[in-house]
Image: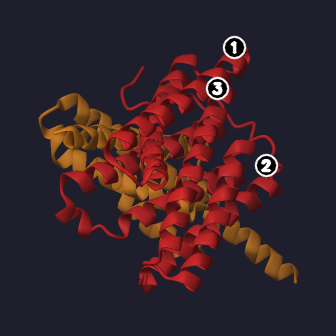
Chain colours: A red, B orange
Amino acid sequence: MPGSADYVIWFLGIILEASVIFCALRRKLFRRYFFLNLYVLLELLVSLGRFRVLAHEGLSSPTYRYFYFYSDALLTIALFFAVISLYMFVFEEMKVERYLRVGAILLLAGTSWFSYEVVNQSSHRMLTYFAFELSQNLYFVGLVLTFVLWGAILKLRETRAMVVQLVLSLGMYFSAFAASYSLSNLSPDIFQHLVYLVPAMGCLLPLSWAYSFWRVSDDARLTPARLAVIPR
Amino acid sequence: MMAAIIFVFSVAALLQFFVSYCRSLIAASVKHPLSVEVQDVTGIATSASGEDFARVIQLLRLCPDRPEDRGEIRAVGAYFGLLNFLQATLAKAVPSLLAWTETERGHCTYFAAVALDRRIAFSRDMLAQQIEI
């Protein structure tokens, strides 16, 4: 069973996810950032669902394991669409929504096909491994997409402070998870000592989004070129 | 090998996003003029030095806490720690990096001074409300 520290991080995550929804509704930003809020809402429901399954079935039960991996795949797909919705914001003046939508669906289909091919060659328990492989690959795609989006923000001189902060939070989240995934492969011994790091990192995204929705005005502007580490 | 490359790439990306995120938090405070009281207390008028950061943070802790700015002060504190680390290590070999870290540390201090200004204004409002009651 998880320890008390796990439960603390878990409940902190639930509170922060609920805060994002509350802040978005309160500031009337729920519809404007619909896919971001949809992802957080799903994350909240999944966290509550996982807690319920854990309480009834236990951590080592197959039900919990299946629920965990399938819900993780679902959340990663929702997060993928959240990233695409940020692309829509950044490129909205260029009127390329249709191409972005088609591109996103093709990218999702391509990643799913790649994950299927990987699993098809190495496993008999197709569906569970497919869900795991898909979410891992989509995380990496998400990191690359966010990096490209940040480049586009700098190049197109996107000035909306909220969009910039939402993208930067997402970038931190994806790169932190990619680093932890690679560290777990690179050195499992070191990773064992960082057992609370991954769930704690998961709390940072709702924390920074809640902050952006609550504190940053929708009209606030900043100069993104000044934010880049290498000055432009 | 592949895991090592991904690890290096992701840590570099994490640092890039973290630095930019902290700078976006600081950017909002750059144009905020400091009140005369805060200028007198901190000795900061228009530009600040990184050396004053710890002192301004100590002054901040003396004021009643504002839940709204707690998170951003922590994030900028972590950024300041990262800049100190860079200054003590890599910047010794790269002079341009030394100048950059010093400017950034100054911005962190100015951000803390603006937070102090807001906390003083907040305390004053609270006191005024209590007197009215």
Chain letter belonging to callout 2: A
Q: Position of residue A165 (x, y in %)?
A: 58, 42
Q: CA distance from mark 1 to mark 2?
A: 24 Å
User: To which residue does mark 1 refer?
Assistant: A94
Three-letter amino acid code at the position of disc 1:
Met
Q: Nearer the viewer, residue A166 or B95?
A: A166
The outermost residue toward the left is B93
Q: Is residue A76 left or right of residue A198?
A: right
Q: CA distance from mark 3 to mark 2?
A: 18 Å
Q: Position of residue A16 (x, y in %)?
A: 62, 65
Location of the C terminus of chain B (image quadrant) = bottom right
The outermost residue toward the front is A124
Answer yes or no: is residue B120 visible.
no
Q: CA distance from mark 3 to mark 1?
A: 9 Å
Crowd band around label 1 with a 10 angstrom C-alpha radius: few (<14), some (14–19), many (20+): few
Three-letter amino acid code at the position of disc 3:
Val
Q: Is residue A217 left or right of residue A145?
A: right
Q: Nearer the viewer, residue A109 or B102?
A: A109
Residue at 32 percent across and 48 percent down: it is: A179
Whether residue A93 is situated above or below residue A83 in the rendered picture: above
| Disc marking residue A30 | 2
Whether residue A187 is situated above or below residue A195 in the rendered picture: above
Three-letter amino acid code at the position of disc 2:
Phe
Answer yes or no: is residue A136 visible.
yes
Crowd band around label 3 with a 10 angstrom C-alpha radius: few (<14), some (14–19), many (20+): many
User: To which residue does mark 3 refer?
Assistant: A90
Q: Position of residue B30 (x, y in %)?
A: 55, 40
